Amino acid sequence: MPQKFLVCQLSRVSKKLPLQLILVVPFVVQIFAVVGLVGWLSLRNGQKAVSDLAGELQEETVARIEQHLTTYLATPQLINQINADAVQRGELQIQSDQSKRYLWQQIQHFDTVSWIYYATQQRGEFIGITRKGRDRQIQIALNQRRNDYQTSYYTLDPETSAIRFLEADPAPSQPTNHPWYKAAIDSGEASWSEIYTDLDTSQLVITASLPVYDDAGAIAGVAGVDLFLNDINRFLSRLQIGESGQTFILERSGLLVASSTAESPFVQNAQGQPERIRATESRNDFIRATAQHIDEYFGSLDEIQPQTQMNFALEGNSSQRSVGSRYFLRVTAFQDGRGLDWLIFVVVPESEFMAQIHASTRSTIMLCLVALLVAIALGTLTAHWIAQPILQLSEASKGLTKHVAQPDFANQQLEAEVEINGANEIRILAKSFNQLSRQLQASFVALEGTNSELEVRVEQLKQVQLQLVQSEKMSTLGQLVAGVAHEINNPVNFIAGNLNYARRYTQELLKLLQLYRKHYPTPPLEIDAQIRAIDLDYVSEDLPKLLTSMTEGTNRICSISKSLRTFSRGDSVQAAVNIHEGIDSTLMILRHRLKENEHRAAIRVNRRYGSLPLVKCYPTQLNQVFMNIIANAIDAFDQPSANLKFSKSSPATITIYTKVADYEDKVIIGIEDNGTGMSEEVRSQIFDYLFTTKPLDKGTGLGLPISRQIIVEKHSGTITCLSAPGLGTEFIIELPI
């Protein structure tokens, strides 16, 4: 109701307003709304695009970092596995100079490791190689029980491969007591140590350790590699994350692992010892503020999910940020399955992407103001240009409406076309109006023709529909007939097979009975009485006849079953078949209708089959044709109104003949009867759909039309009918061989 009331009020108000105002106000409102909406959508889409772009940049950066970490951290694990295999093969031993040369060659290929070593479980001895001091001099370390676990250092001459003693550390150190050794023993698999600071190089280092097993499955020792982490800092600093984006890596404890800044991940404490720093205590304002925000938001780094993405604003001023600056943050967990659980932070300032968006917003506001002014001016001019041509078109439309309302509009001559001098759109509208007028008249003419054609098509569709119904019925009948034939065939075959044995056993019993009567002509009184009671002579004579009659009956059932199968076989493709078999199968199915009934005597069937070759056809469809024609002939004999008079010498007869045509490669099939025949009026319509002379419950008028379609369209043959009243009817079918 409120909507209806509003429409009525607007309608009343619009009647009092001039056309200029009606055109200008909606035009201005629409322009303002569209421009404002476009501007707002542009801003929103721009912000979304910025967010998506930042997300893609962060995702790409994280992927590169993860790839580098995976490759970088796989190196020590690979070295450990190689050395474990060498121990098992006997190539890496504590007291072997060859093992020292082996480690010397190995460390040459890996610049990022500070130590490669192996310690035994049984004796607690140790062999390793290291880059010692800030000059990273390569030295071989050997720790043996015979030297009271004092570590001796050696060097190797690259040219002569000679091993030379350098110095010995007097402080004893048994490797099996070290944390990296115990961690590997406790876990029983590859593991990482805590991150610590190397005193010689002042760099963060992490140890990868791997237990080594002997052939018996017992622990033989532990292989270890100390890995420098400063290369991760160098890699992160080389990443280009926009203009001022930053990335850093933390442990779940909040300790800094690496960053893209120049800040060192540790500081010197009051005792002069290196001490790792937390991100919340970083000297870098950017890292510190981000870490503090994460702590405030999540409460603990352990609460961060494997993938976390968010936007946040940082408060305060510094060289890296300003008050209210917004940032895109992505936190990704990095876990290698061996104990590492790091968090990768990628932070990108929103300001790097929003400059163009803000400029676009200002441009949109200016466009809105300009569009309003232009819309007012154009609306006024448009009202003037449109009013007059619209009135002219209105008059022409009224005239066209009067013509259309007349019954003979399709045959009338249209008035002169409308000519308007105005705006291009109005001229196009006038041209369209003229075209519409012509098309309208043409449509009326076409509509009359279409109505006539539609009536014909509807009639054809009815015929096709009835044909499809009949085809579906025949298909269902075929399936039913085939099933019945199959069910009959099994027990009949069983009976027929046993009759032969019954006949032979009967003959043998009768022969035995004759021999008995021959040798014992005077049986006991009781047996003689029973012989007379059952009339043994009659039974002996009648029993073979009874078996012969049963054999004929089973043969008759087998013949009917075979005919049913022949009549119902499928027609997916054409097949070369014997036409006579199809005719005989049809007659077998209709045999019960050929018998005598209350209206007539039995119908005689004369077969005059010629010598025919196999014909390529659709057998089931041809059987349907034979069924329709022969059934119609029987129906003609069964009509009570036929007044047919037949005798034993001249009974009701259906004659079927076949032959090969003399003039073409065709076979001819003729089916004729001596019934009442048809008038020329009836004969000329028998192939028309739905035409029938039978009662409504006896026929559909589809049999012969479908038969003609099968012969002509499916087999490229012909079917003709010859008939006259009182002279019977003959159908002649010609099929190509």
Image (cartoon, helix red, strand yellow):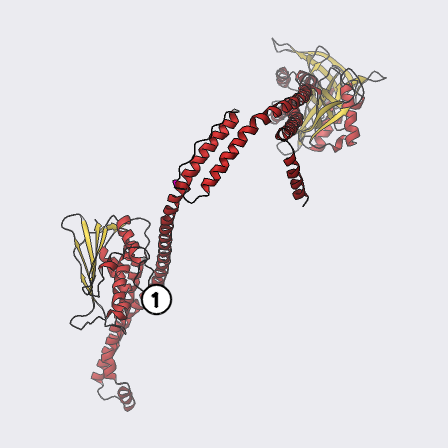
Residue 623 shown left or right of residue 384 in the figure: left
Residue for badge 1: 491
- As shown in the figure, which amino acid type bears the numbered disc 1? Pro
* Residue bounds of the magenta highlight: 411-415
Judging depth in this view, the residue of 224 and 274 nearest the camera is: 274
Q: How many callouts does the rendering have?
A: 1
SS of the residue under disc 1: helix
- Asked whether residue 413 is drawn in magenta, I would say yes
- Name which quarter of the figure residue 324 lies in: top right
Residue 632 in percent (x, y) is at 27, 62
Q: Give the residue at x 58% y 26%.
A: 384
Residue 243 in percent (x, y) is at 68, 16
Judging depth in this view, the residue of 122 and 526 nearest the camera is: 526
Judging depth in this view, the residue of 159 and 712 nearest the camera is: 712
Magenta stretch, main secondary structure, is loop
- Asked whether residue 298 is drawn in magenta, I would say no
Q: Residue furthest right?
A: 270
Judging depth in this view, the residue of 70 and 726 nearest the camera is: 726
Q: Residue furthest bottom?
A: 525
Residue 28 visible somewhere in the drawing: yes
Residue 93 visible somewhere in the drawing: no
Asked if residue 654 is positioned above or below residue 572 in the image, the reply reads below
Bin the neighbour count of mark 1 within 10 Å (Cα to Cα): few under 14, some 14-19, many 20 and up: few
